[in-house]
Amino acid sequence: MKRPLLLLLCALVSACALFRRPPHPVYAPPEEAAAVTFPAEPLATGGHVSLSGNQLAAIELAMEDFLPWDAKPGKEASPREVCLSKRASYDVIAAPGPEGIVFVEIYARPGACDMGLGPVLDFEATYAIDIVQWRILAIQH
């Protein structure tokens, strides 16, 4: 009687490992944080980017489809493939569309991952995001 219960428990615990949560933010040590000087003027006065909450959420949804947070390059990946597996290698444009839609374009940042092989041209996509039901309506590659 105990053996089937133990097997069921082991199966459930193993299955939980498949459902990984996104990583939590990492904080710098207090000494390093104390050395940061915030701008005296509000951020809205200078070189900044301002996004609506809907645009930010649409970007997150599109980026999670384009390059999931837990995606890892294969063991045989080239340096360029490793570079392209990092979200920091991409730039994003978000623009409002017709009622309830935000368009999100994700493309390799110019100069990122070139590595003397020329520009990266085939790693981009434009998403149509439904910001009412929070779903991907369409993708153009």
Image (tube, rainbow, N blue to C red):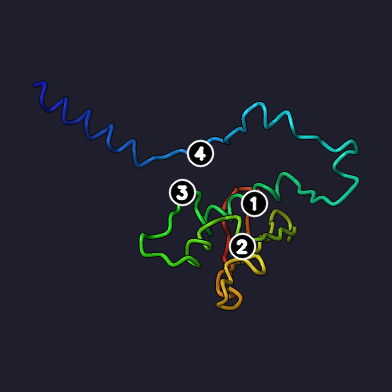
How many numbered discs?
Answer: 4
Amino acid type for the residue under numbered disc 1: Ala
Marks 3/1: CA distance? 19 Å
Amino acid type for the residue under numbered disc 2: Tyr
Q: Element under label 3? A: loop
Q: Element under label 1? A: helix
Residue drawn at x 61%, y 32% is 27
- Left or right, 25 with reference to 31: left
Residue topped by disc 4: 23
The quadrant of the image that shows the C terminus is bottom right
Q: Quadrant of residue 86?
A: bottom right
- Left or right, 64 with reference to 95: left
Q: Residues within 10 Å of mark 1 (few under 14, many from 20)?
A: many
Asked whether disc 1 touches disc 2, contact meaning CB atoms under 8 Å apart, the reply is: yes
Marks 4/2: CA distance? 24 Å
> In this view of the protein, which residue sits in the foreground, 135 or 125?
125
Tag shown at residue 70? 3
Marks 1/2: CA distance? 9 Å
Amino acid type for the residue under numbered disc 4: Pro
> In this view of the protein, which residue sits in the foreground, 7 or 138?
7
Ranked by sequence position, the earlier of labels 1 and 4 is 4
Marks 1/4: CA distance? 19 Å
- Taking 128 as reference, is 22 above or below it? above
Residue 111 coordinates in the image, percent (x, y): 65, 69
Q: Element under label 4? A: loop
Ranked by sequence position, the earlier of labels 4 and 2 is 4
Ranked by sequence position, the earlier of labels 4 and 3 is 4
**Closer to the observer: label 1 or label 4?**
4
